[in-house]
Image (cartoon, rainbow, N blue to C red):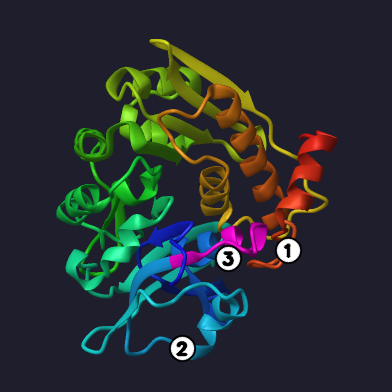
């Protein structure tokens, strides 16, 4: 009998294509695997090779088989990867032109359906909801909340709450009011199990507040028993949690990498690395949460040192960087 999943990441796997436009000419680079299920699972498995890491995802008939090689090499559990023979795999195009980046989604796979996944999935020790194009509905999340049998932490990235993908492939953000309403509904489902993660832009887009400390204070007033992670790249991050009825907020420094090559996937790495260091979001002491956030910051600093997933490191090296305490 297989042991329970240590972490399950939910959402679409994407096929990402980078395009550089110079003097009207398009240079198309090799397509690679993307999405939270890709970066998050590889980060978690690299950190803890003995952990059972699974992805609950859906791809289309056109998925390039070689894109699964990095996940197979890490022995990530792909038993809950569903192939929809009637759909295309979700695709993103990242177009760089004149110093600007435009992201579009020319293809979307079908939405995740709760009934497609086995019951054992909901016995996982931790979850990361990594929606990238609206593929995880509130109905799915509600059923998921009913299916989880214990007090496992559930992480959610606000990018998935905010992003609105249109039929023509363009991407915009939903309104601040709608984003806050959706976040509130998710909180009503998971309550104290919820870990909310977003970068400074995303947290402002949901709360309407630019100052990071005031933003976290707002989240903790609206959603009293959640944990909040607000990331700011090289400026570090913030951890927020209500302790004994009072908002406790701590600045987490950004660890200095040896070099910066590719920052794609840093947010997913941060969240899954944080989740990997806690067992129960509601009863976790603030000191333990702070240690987890430092670990997450250090893990992300390794990711950016090389292309794609090559910079990721096991927990031992991450903890060594935490101990050295060399920051930006």
Q: Find numbered disc 2 in the image and state the secondary structure of the residue it sits on.
A: loop
Q: Position of residue 170 (x, y in %)?
A: 30, 63
Q: Residue at x 39, y 77 (%)?
A: 79
Residue assigned mark 1: 306
- Specify start and end residues of the magenta stretch as a single range: 42-54
Residue assigned mark 3: 42
Q: Position of residue 53 (x, y in %)?
A: 50, 64
Check whether the beta carbons of the residues at disc 1 and disc 3 lie within 8 A of each other: no
Q: Find numbered disc 1 in the image and state the secondary structure of the residue it sits on.
A: loop
Compared with residue 300, is residue 231 higher up or lower down, i.e. above or below?
A: above
Compared with residue 39, is residue 269 higher up or lower down, i.e. above or below?
A: above
Check whether the beta carbons of the residues at disc 2 and disc 1 lie within 8 A of each other: no
The C terminus, quarter of image? top right
Mark 3 surroundings within 10 Å by alpha-carbon count, few (fewer than 14), some (14 through 19), many (20 or more) = many
Residue assigned mark 2: 64
Q: Is residue 326 something that shows in the picture?
A: no
């Amino acid at each position: 009998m297989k042991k329970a999943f240590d972490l399950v990441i939910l959402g679409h796997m994407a096929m990402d294509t980078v395009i550089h436009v110079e003097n009207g000419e398009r240079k198309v680079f090799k397509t690679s695997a993307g999405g939270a299920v890709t970066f998050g699972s590889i980060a978690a498995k690299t950190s803890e090779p003995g952990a059972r890491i699974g992805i609950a995802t859906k791809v289309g008939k056109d998925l390039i088989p070689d894109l699964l090689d990095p996940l197979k090499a890490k022995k990530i559990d792909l038993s809950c990867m569903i192939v929809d023979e009637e759909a295309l795999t979700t695709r993103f195009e990242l177009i760089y032109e004149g110093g600007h980046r435009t992201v579009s989604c020319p293809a979307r796979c079908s939405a995740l359906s709760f009934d497609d996944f086995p019951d054992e999935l909901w016995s996982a020790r931790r979850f990361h909801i990594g929606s990238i194009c609206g593929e995880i509905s509130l109905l799915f999340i509600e059923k998921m909340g009913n299916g989880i049998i214990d007090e496992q932490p559930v992480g959610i990235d606000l990018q998935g709450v905010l992003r609105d993908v249109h039929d023509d492939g363009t991407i915009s953000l939903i309104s601040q009011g709608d984003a806050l309403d959706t976040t509130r509904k998710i909180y009503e489902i998971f309550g104290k199990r919820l870990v909310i993660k977003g970068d400074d832009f995303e947290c402002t887009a949901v709360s309407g507040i630019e100052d990071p400390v005031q933003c976290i204070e707002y989240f903790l007033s609206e959603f009293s028993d959640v944990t909040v992670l607000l990331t700011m790249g090289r400026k570090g991050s913030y951890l927020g949690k209500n302790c004994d009825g009072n908002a406790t907020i701590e600045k987490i420094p950004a660890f200095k990498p040896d070099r910066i090559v590719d920052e794609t996937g840093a947010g997913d790495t941060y969240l899954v690395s944080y989740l990997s260091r806690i067992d129960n979001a509601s009863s976790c002491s603030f000191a333990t949460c702070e240690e987890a956030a430092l670990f997450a910051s250090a893990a992300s600093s390794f990711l950016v040192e090389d292309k794609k997933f090559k910079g990721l490191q096991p927990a031992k090296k991450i903890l060594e960087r935490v101990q050295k305490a060399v920051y930006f």
